[in-house]
Amino acid sequence: MTTSIYYVGYDAAHPGDFIYDIPDGHDFWLLILTQTPAEFWVQGEIREYPANCAVLFPPRQKIMYRACSGQFVNDWVRFETDESYVLETTLPRGVPIPVPDPGYCRQLFQLLATENFFSCDYRELSIDYLFRILFNKLLEAFQSKENSPHYQKLLNLRKAIHNRPGAEWSVRSMADDVHLSPGYLQTLYKATFGISCMDDVIQCRIRLAKERLIHGSLRIADISELCGYKNVEHFSRQFRRIVGCTPREYRQSVDLRL
């Protein structure tokens, strides 16, 4: 079972009169990710779709899309495969689907381009892994019920929380960041991710604290401050409530196991 790339490109920019029209389709698969709005031939008519959509064209299916708002920018890959996760995918064929986290998918296209360019020992295996991840993300996007108008803002907020758990997070500051009321933010965040925004902050802080307690020699007071706690006693109480022991006891238990 293999997947072979004919060509892969990303951030490909085209002028406003761009049109791609292949009436009988290709002999290979084509997957594109739009970065700008575009018009596609879908079910016998031209329809306009917003930016950040993915479209999978199987071999020998009509392909037609064009720019509709000035410059057209997209990522794309032409490939051949006999992998079941592609051949039997439930993704619609030739129909754009919104991608809630396009930046992540664009990074996968860039990695595919890099792996395809170099002749490394694990090139084919790496390409296969990247394709599997990409198709998983597209299936998540297709099956997701959370693609509300605010989803991308919530996703960016969650990324920021996980990247910087020690920042001075509060419901009010997070609500201001995403331009929502505090109450509406808390409702949307819990419905989207299954956890409240402040509980997410606390979980990330405790995870960072455990990492620093295991690896490194920082004082507990310093770890507390690093994780966003102004009061070491508050940090210790919260750590014990979640982990079941104090930070000092946790460090000692890890040292004993080592």
Image: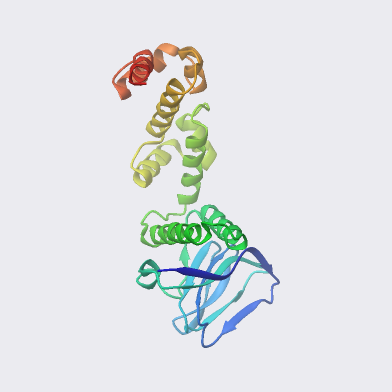
> Quick check: 41 above or below 163?
below
Q: Which residue, as the protein is rendered here, is positioned at the far front? A: 121
> Quick check: 172 above or below 8?
above
- Picture quarter with the C terminus: top left
The residue at 48%/30% (across/down) is: 165
Q: In this view, does 186 lie to the left or right of 221?
A: left
Q: Which residue, as the protein is rendered here, is positioned at the far right? A: 15
Using the image as rendered, state which of residue 205 and residue 85 is in the foreground: 85
Q: Using the rendered image of the protein, determine whether residue 99 is visible from the camera's viewpoint.
A: no
The spot of residue 225 in percent (x, y) is 51, 18
Q: Is residue 2 left or right of residue 49?
A: left
The spot of residue 232 in percent (x, y) is 44, 13
The spot of residue 51 in percent (x, y) is 56, 63
The residue at 40%/37% (across/down) is: 183
The spot of residue 121 in percent (x, y) is 54, 57
The residue at 55%/68% (across/down) is: 77
